[in-house]
Amino acid sequence: MKKRLLNYISKLTNAVNRIDEDQLNQLYVQFKEKLFDMKDIHILGNGGSSANAHHVVGDYIKTFALYKTNLKISCLSDNSCYVTAAANDLDYSEVYELLVGTRITPGDLLLIMSGSGNSMNLTKAALAAKRKGVKIASITGYSGGEIARLSDISIHVPIDDMEMAEDAQIIVMHCIKQRLCEMLEGKNGELLSATKYNKRVHEGLVA
């Protein structure tokens, strides 16, 4: 089993090594700008990508609140009442497109996370965002699909494996968060004290 794990890590590492560094830097700059311009970041995804978006949003909200910084970030699949109502009244392929021009407006950043890059609801949202002049970023696997083609910033991880494509989404977003934290530490000083966190992580105590 350990050999299988090491092979998994090696394959994922090889794919991550092929990410375009310029595109990665552009995504970081977009997040950095949103820390200060008070415009919104919206993350879209389906299935595991939606779960990753949910995690990233919660992680970023807490972390940057501890830095006394208001990052306006949301996962638009978090409200199951909205998603199921819109899917029931319209079609599941339109649940995200409907929000472009209403919740998602020019000046915002739309980040789409997708394994295949070809999900219909994400593609429709990207097309609508293009028409409205909303900047689109994406993190995709496989060939990148239509989503990568439509994106202004495309983080493409060339891996034909859905689990690894989803792993890569988290790797990219955690990397960007750490770089943002380093920037804020240099600008604003230390992170606001999180006593319980320090006890659990650094002191090895139950807290």
Image (tube, helix red, strand yellow):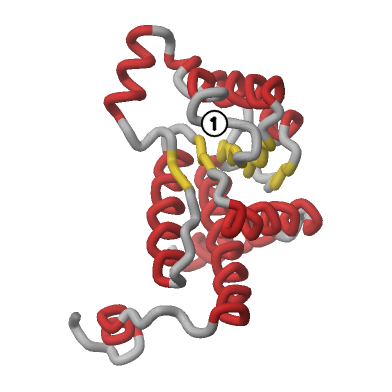
Q: Nearer the viewer, residue 15 or 175?
A: 175
* Residue bearing the label numbered 1: 104
What x and y, as percent, mark residue 79? Answer: 32, 33
**Residue at point 64%, 33% (across, down):** 106
What x and y, as percent, mark residue 168? Answer: 58, 53
The quarter holding residue 28 reads: bottom right
Residue 141 in view (yes/no): no
What x and y, as percent, mark residue 34? Answer: 60, 53
Classify residue 166 as left or right of residue 27. left
Question: Looking at this rendering, what residue extends furthest in the left direction?
Answer: 206
Question: Looking at this rendering, what residue extends furthest in the bottom direction?
Answer: 203
Q: Is residue 196 above or below residue 76?
A: below
What SS does tag 1 mark? loop
The quarter holding residue 109 reads: top right
Q: Nearer the viewer, residue 55 or 102?
A: 102
Image quarter of the C terminus: bottom left
Question: Looking at this rendering, what residue extends furthest in the front direction?
Answer: 37
Q: Residues within 10 Å of mark 1 (few under 14, many from 20)?
A: many
Q: Is residue 29 above or below residue 97?
A: below
Q: Is residue 83 above or below residue 43?
A: above
**Residue at point 60%, 62% (across, down):** 176
**Residue at point 68%, 47% (across, down):** 157
What x and y, as percent, mark residue 91? Answer: 43, 10
Classify residue 26 as left or right of residue 58. right
The quarter holding residue 47 reads: top left
**Residue at point 53%, 84% (across, down):** 189
Amino acid type at mark 1: Ile
Q: How many labels were placed on the picture? A: 1
Question: Looking at this rendering, what residue extends furthest in the top direction?
Answer: 89
Residue 131 in view (yes/no): yes
Image quarter of the N terminus: bottom left
Q: Nearer the viewer, residue 90 or 106?
A: 106
